[in-house]
Image (cartoon, rainbow, N blue to C red):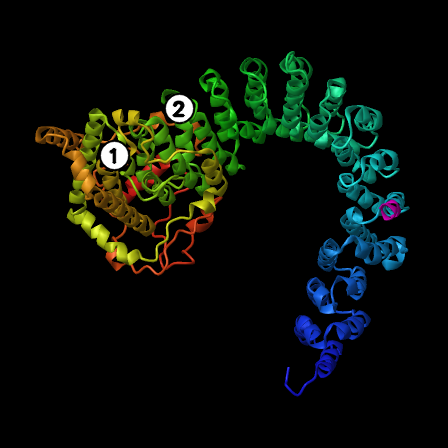
Amino acid sequence: MDESETPLDEFEVFKDAIKEEDLEVQIKMMKQLGSLAKHLGEELTRDELIPFIQENIDFHDEILLNLSEQLEQFIPLVGGYEHSQSVLDLLRKLCHTDEEIVINKTVETMKTIALGLNSDLTEKLFVPMVEAMASEDLFTICIYHIYIHKHITIILYVFQTIYSKVKEETKIELRHSFRVLVQDESPIVRKKAASILVDLIFLLEKDCLRDEFIPVFDNISKDSMDFVRTMLMRIAIALCKNLTESEIEEFVFATVESCADDTSWNIRLMLAHHIGEVQENIPFGKMRGKILAMYQKLINDIQDEVRVEAVNNLSSYCQNLKKSYETTNSVNNNFEAVFQQSIVPHLKRLANDPNENVRLAFSTNIIAISSIVGENCFKEDIMPIIEHILEQDSCMDIQENILQRLHSLPAYVDLTESSLSIKIVVRKLIFNSHAKWRTRRSLLVAFLHIANTATGAYFSDNLKMFYATLLGDPVFAVRRTAPVILPLLAKQYGIEWATDYILPFFRMFVKDCRYLYRYIPLFGINELMNPSVRLGQKETYLNDLRHIIQTSNDDADKKKVAAILTRIARMIDTLKYKLEDTIYRDILTLNESIDDFTSDNIMLYADECVTTIKTNCNCNIFAIENKSMLDQRIYLDGLLAVIIIEYLQIIRELFDDPIVNVQIRSIHALNKIKEFTSKIDDELKETWVSEAVDVLTAEEKEQIEKLVDSEMDERPKMISKEDIDTQLMEDDRIDNNFEDSPDDKTDLHDRKIPEIKVEAVDDQVSIVDETEIINSKEENGSLELIEKPQFEISKAHADEIWNSALKA
């Protein structure tokens, strides 16, 4: 404010600005309202400023919102709570706006002011306002019911805030006003009043609750509008929390019980939704059987939606039913007998329900029962139902639901006993899921759940082929997700198991005729080195070995750690030596040419799967959790061997690929190997490593190094097409005899990398189908697809084309 300008002058400027139609000016001036009030002083603010705003309140919604926010801080500016009448009048006027966000903020401000008032001021200022608002003809506020709903919301929330602060006489008047609203002729008002009653019950005195509001509860139960009666269950549960057993039985339970037979399925739906809470809050043995009968009616209801909701609350109801037996009759707890006799028969019917949504909900909730019933009951009664769903249900989503929740099965369930069920359903899901690629992707999560309880032999005998099939899935998102679980399988069953049974499937894609499929081996090595779901401390590989050295007093353990460190050091030296080879050094130097290359964002293709795996996986891939693992080949040891024996050669072959993008990815992968090697080498140079290795004699070190050298000379295990279930694939496009061709080194095009100038290279791969990009240039990069992969042709036809090309 200018020194020559008085507060009144400033007020005049404010009035002129507010009366203008320039919205920006109005907003700017409204934001200065608090400052103006300070300059005007308390009296002028009460007598001049606020009345002016009331008279000119027809502002834009943004201004009204800003006003409602500022009024919360206005109490000291008008002289304190005893002078807050003008602020309350303005807030009451704001209640008549039609913008919900303004209404909500106004209610918050009113409640904040009410909390600061003492009892006398509450009686003097707030109660008259609430009574006046309650007595207004709501239909004169606005002809639309939605606005009546907002207005009554304000009345009830303010009522709830001030009730505990007023005198007994005023409480009687407020309760009367509330009962009037509950019986209002507008069903919208009656429903909103019923919803507020749920919270108000906890504020009411016990006598008032029983004498005045039980009749209100009865009136609501008899309301002609079913959408008003839908509030019954919430009110009943609130009453049960405040009444004794005899009072519940006398005043509440009969109404709750009648809801199971209500003619409106919406009422039965609400009972099904709250059935677990009903059992929790009415745990008494006298009424337990009747609640069970209610639940039986609900899970057999003629309305599909009611059955779905009842099934969704199966676990909640059973858990509270069990708890009621434990708390009221701990000596003769026969919950399991009741469950087997009164609930299991209905569960068997639900497994064959004609409605697919009911069965889908059932498949989502049935496994959760394992945490409630005992081992024998689950094995004898629940597992046969689960196996029946897996084998017989025709809906893939339902079978998928079961497989995705296998991690919730208790430890005593041996999945190998159900191998036929799981094997059949996995094969059927893959075979019939052409239009549902997410179903196939979710199977990868199911494989991990199965691996947590099954042996490596079981997995290799029953699921290995399905995993190989998903590696070669026609949808990129599935192929990209499949390698994510590779390090987890290797951790679960051992890196040697993965080397023997899984990695050969990655190698076979090196010669696939479709260039996008030739990425798969590179995805595999990247996941092994840098797992997408790696947990625990990152970028450290030898920390657990160091911890064992520092904490163990067992010389045998220290010798085992020393042997492992010697093996790792030898393999790192071998890797460093190989990377100095001319061909690999040349490839590594090309990394600068692909500076703009960005690897795939795995979350784009596998967001749900990775999130689920991280939630249910508690292992650190590179960790050595206990000393017993020192007797096995640790993950890092096996991974280094895989890189040396297999992946250096794979990268070399893919660097010779005729497709530029494959070449670039091979460069990227080799540089990742280089980075991986350097990080481990840096850790090996730490002082503690040399000290740990010193416990070995020179002869022992030499013997270990010779053993490592001999292992590095081994040839990788190959896989034949006979090992693949080709019926699950679109066609057979992997030519395992390709490398036996006399001219297998012939380049289809001149290669390659030194002339590449990459501006931005990242395969813009469709999650669902790659066919859209096959015949086009990459829109976001400077590379053009050199080779057009063959699609929808037989292997024989492909061989014929290839041989003709060689002869030409």
Of 554 and 681, the residue lying toward us: 554
263 up-or-down from 80: above or below: above
| Image coords of residue 524 (percent x, y) | 34, 39
- The answer to whether residue 465 is left or right of residue 437 is left
* Magenta span contains residue 169: yes
**Which quadrant of the view contains residue 563?**
top left
Near-viewer residue (731 or 297): 297
For disc 2, the marked residue is 459
Please state, as top left, top right, bottom left or bottom right, where the N terminus lies in the image: bottom right
> Where 486 falls versus 95 (above or below)?
above
- 246 over 713 or under it: above or below: above
Residue at left 63%, top 26%?
315
Q: Which of 606 and 57 is in front in this view?
A: 57
Residue 130 image position (x, y, % from top left): 84, 54
Determine if the magenta segment contains residue 216. Answer: no
Is 57 on the left or on the right of 176, as rendered? left
Q: Which x, y percent locates residue 75?
A: 72, 64
Q: Evaluate whether residue 770 shows in this view.
A: no
Amino acid carrying label 1: it is: Gln
Instruction: Identify the residue position indicated by label 1 in the image.
Output: 550
Magenta stretch, main secondary structure, is: helix
Q: What stretch is highlighted in magenta?
A: 168-173
Circle 1 or circle 2, nearest the eye: 1
Q: Which residue is drawn at 75% across and 29% down?
A: 303
Question: Residue 224: image x %, image y %?
Answer: 88, 37
Residue drawn at x 80%, y 40% as measured from the top left: 204
Q: Is disc 2 surrounded by few (<14), some (14 to 19) or many (20+) residues within 10 Å?
A: many
